[in-house]
Image (cartoon, rainbow, N blue to C red):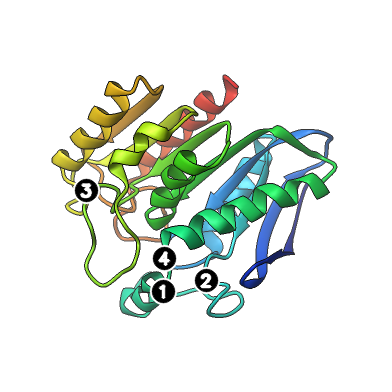
Amino acid sequence: MIMENFLTIGTPSGSMPVFMAAPEGEKLPVIIVIQEIFGVNEHIKNVCRRLAGEGYIALAPELFHRQGTHITVPYSDRDSAQPLLAALTNEDLVSDIRDVISFLRELPQAETSKVFTLGFCAGGFASLLAATKLQITGAISFYGSGVVRPREGIQLRPFAPKLSDVRSPLLMFFGEKDASIPEGDRFEIRRVLDENHIPHELVVFGEADHGFFCDERKSYHAASAKLAWEKMIGWLAQF
């Protein structure tokens, strides 16, 4: 049986709502699911539910909590999401993820020695960023953009050289057709990780574009999404 609810976590910036989906059980591994720029919407909640079905506690913090509560934006209205993204900083992302990790001490069923991050788009950026700053078991990133090159109009800063500070294995998924993360960016990420002997897998799906995992987006690519999920679940099982 899967149980789900919203929790509230205290942060230096105020209360942060966190969606949680968890199976019944004791001492289960934890995955922190990090949203796209569209908020903790049904897609993100469904990812949490699916992970709970695989035996994980899944927690999705609302990164826009500084602007309001339960903020979501339709996929068709990217323009409304941009100001929300623009308000975030690298420090905000790390702080929020750190606060979720600290909160795990209050969850008796959480196996705090097995904590992963999993993010999509801006959340994929955040998942990799967290691996450079925090002690986690592993980090998964789906089409995390902005890691190598700055993006106009937002405060989030590239951090590719800091990937040398990562101390946990990484799993990354990209779409070959994703113009926002060209081959040169993927090459640079791989180069830094290889040169610093950091365990990682970087998977590129030839028919996939940005957002290929989300079945609510026009760019959804079912075959790539299925393969990525299977790869991710197998990768997680090794820990």
Upstream in sequence: badge 3 or badge 4: 4
First in residue order: circle 2 vs circle 1: 2
Disc 2 secondary structure class: loop
| Nearer-the-camera pick, 229 or 239 | 239
Question: Would you say 6 lies left or right of 143 here?
Answer: right
Looking at the image, tell me whether mark 3 or mark 2 is earlier in sequence order. 2
Tell me the CA gap for discs 2 and 1. Answer: 9 Å
What is the number of the mark on residue 37? Answer: 4
- Please say whether residue 181 is visible from this viewpoint: yes
Question: Callout 4: 10 Å neighbours few (<14), some, many (20+)?
Answer: many
Residue tagged 1: 87
Q: Is residue 51 left or right of residue 110?
A: left
Identified by mark 1, the residue type is: Ala
Inter-mark Cα distance, 1 to 3 = 22 Å
> Could you tell me which secondary element the residue under label 1 belongs to?
loop
Q: Position of residue 139 (x, y in %)?
A: 49, 37
Q: Amino acid at mark 4?
A: Ile
**Residue identifier under label 3:** 181
Q: Residues within 10 Å of mark 3 (few under 14, many from 20)?
A: many
Which residue carries the number 2 mark? 64
Q: Position of residue 69 (x, y in %)?
A: 61, 77
Q: Amino acid at mark 2?
A: Phe
* Percent coordinates x, y for residue 8 in the rendering: 73, 66
User: As shown in the figure, which amino acid type bears the numbered disc 3?
Assistant: Ile
From the image, state whether disc 4 or disc 1 is nearer to you.
1
